[in-house]
Amino acid sequence: MYPSGGVVCAFHIIDLGAMQILDSRGRPTLSVTLTLAGGATGWAGVPSGLSTGTKEAVELRDGDMSRYGGAGVSRAAALVTGSIFHRLKGRPWHSLADVDQALIELDGTAAKSRLGGNATVGVSMATARAVAASQGQQLWEFLSPYTVRPRLPVPHFNLVSGGMLASNQLDFQEFMIAPIGAPSMAEAVRAGAEIYAVLRRNLAAAGRPTGQGDDGGFAPDFTHPREVLAALVEAIDDAGYTPARDQVAIALDPAASRFRRADGAYQVAGERLSSLELIELYAELAADYPIWSIEDGLAEDDTGGWRQLTDRLGERLQLVGDDVFVTNPAIIEQGITAGIANAALIKVDQVGTVTETLQAMEVCRKHEYARMVSHRSGETVDDFIAELAVAGGCGQVKSGAPARGERVIKYNRLLHIASQRPDLPYGLAEPGGR
């Protein structure tokens, strides 16, 4: 089913390097470089999340408080060049899936806690790039399952940040625009950039701060989501576009686990809301603004609330599970059985290998759940997720604002793919689309 699972010419890993670099938040992360016999190489810059689910693959950090506040990754780098390289060298491999399975077995834990999910995903991503190069393929071509038609995805641009991503008082974490009605990838990126520029101008004219959050979105001193939504609609209109669910739509990532209190209530703009009251707030906002997608609308442990949210709004809106699914195929299956959400966020570092990420996307396709490929708040100039989004044919990607190098490199890669392959369709895919 997957190129990574199919038989290819045997390849041999002859060198594996890793070093500590900085991510976009100034925290350490891994850079991994892998070389095959014959000279093909692959590189990976490992992303790192701040707003994380409890069941994600574990990042291995040094814990040495005298260096980087304990956040160093020198131990993970040493494991890559030590025990992982020892396991992978000196034998033929026939697929990325085989390499990833070896990493899973070597780690031997459910959460990749022995080697670190940051170490395993770095090696997996670098292997995928090296094998694709050795086969003379673009990475997106190599990653694309045989049963899936590659597709250029609708970019979801973060224009306003809150929650853990910014220092303002907004409880919701991300307010995004999605140029669903754009005729092409190039026009979608243009719309995002132009609306972003107009929003900056409007905020400045109103005396609002235009500093940026971790994802590049602005962090103005708003307190209620309605203030942000009104500002987005105004910016879309001022930029000459149509704010509508089939034109330039709005997507939310409240990241509700972050503002749920110990007693189960949710705190939004100073109000304490029950699960049902928060669901009604979403319904009201979706009635008043062109919202098409809500990610992590309820906390990951609020299973009953998730069912109610899906029953109430699942026919009308895309409801994306992130913390509740963590790109884990088995957990996604469980959530689908429980009637939770109708889409899954896909983050390759959440599960720890590329093969498991592809499997998670296949589970979604099988059950006609939509997929949105996503970056993390701590990013590098690695554009792997752009390739993955095209390969998976999911039709959706988010990489933050149309600003800052670590964000725009993903969008720019999509522009390059679009220019090289004008035959690829652009836009949302059917949830089970292949």
Image (cartoon, rainbow, N blue to C red):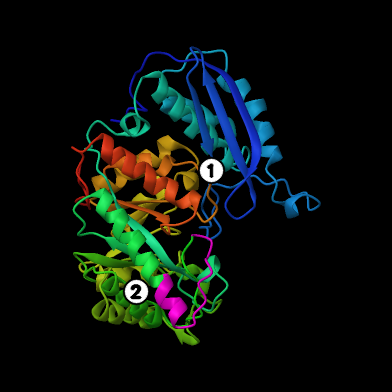
The amino acid marked with disc number 2 is Leu
- Dot 2: within a 10 Å radius of its alpha carbon, few (fewer than 14), some, or many (20 or more) residues? many
Mark carried by residue 110: 1
Callout 1 secondary element: loop
Query: Residue 197 at x, y = what percent?
Result: 39, 66
Q: Which residue is mark 2?
A: 232
Callout 2 secondary element: helix
Query: Residue 5 at x, y = what percent?
Result: 35, 27
Query: On the image, which quarter does residue 46 sit in?
Result: top right
- The quarter of the rendered structure image containing the C terminus is top left
In the image: residue 80, left or right of residue 170 = right
Q: Which residues are magenta?
A: 200-215
- Dot 1: within a 10 Å radius of its alpha carbon, few (fewer than 14), some, or many (20 or more) residues? few
Query: Is residue 136 shown to the viewer in this render?
Result: yes
Query: Residue 70 at x, y = what percent?
Result: 73, 52
Relative depth, front residue between 143 and 275 = 143
Query: Is residue 341 shown to the viewer in this render?
Result: no
The amino acid marked with disc number 1 is Ala
